[in-house]
Amino acid sequence: MSEQFVKLARAYGDRVEGPLLVSTDGFSPRYDLDRATGIITRAGHSLYGRQLAGSIVAFPTAKGGVAAGWAFLDLQSRGLAPLAFVFGITNSVMVHGAVMAGVPIADGLSPAAWEHVQKARWAELRPEERGLRLMM
């Protein structure tokens, strides 16, 4: 198993490690996610039918906004939140929602780093180092 360490522009929360679930689509908690189950339910989404709980989830972009705050808090209160969110690019509302729910979040992956993320199966988010350790 090979490893790669990639830098992030920003990261917040506790260090977490777990399976990496990578999407080729952006993420909206309002339109892509069934908040009652924590499963991606938008037809055509690259993670359609997948549950986010128990994984570090990576998305190239965040979509939308205002639903994130209460959606993430609701998911966390029912044990359905992911271990962490990693975005290529996110927005302030998504960050606010994750912080409010206590879910680690990071963004600012370069295109080269995103290529490594897409090949990985396991990750350790290290917010204190603004880094992501990837295991292929």
Image (cartoon, rainbow, N blue to C red):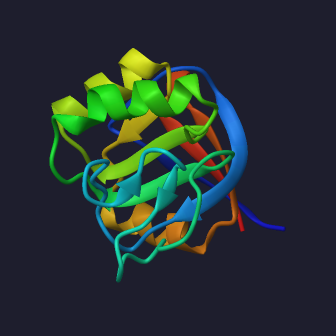
Residue 23, x across and y down, in percent: 44, 68
At 43% across and 77% down in the image, what residue appears?
Answer: 46
Q: In which quarter of the image is residue 10?
A: top left
Quarter of the picture holding the C terminus: bottom right
Q: Residue reaching furthest bottom?
A: 44
Question: Which sits in the foreground, 133 or 84?
Answer: 84
Question: Which sits in the foreground, 20 or 44?
Answer: 44
Residue 83, x across and y down, in percent: 61, 38
At 71% across and 40% down in the image, what residue appears?
Answer: 17
Residue 125, x across and y down, in percent: 59, 38
Viewed as shown, does residue 25 lie left or right of 52? left
Viewed as shown, does residue 91 lie left or right of 40? left
| Residue 36 higher or lower than 25, as above or below | above
At 18% across and 30% down in the image, what residue appears?
Answer: 92
Viewed as shown, does residue 46 lie left or right of 135? left
At 64% across and 67% down in the image, what residue appears?
Answer: 120
Residue 58, x across and y down, in percent: 46, 56
| Residue 16 higher or lower than 123, as above or below | above
Quarter of the picture holding the N terminus: bottom right
Q: In which quarter of the image is residue 61?
A: bottom left
Give the number of marks.
0
Q: Residue reaching furthest right?
A: 1
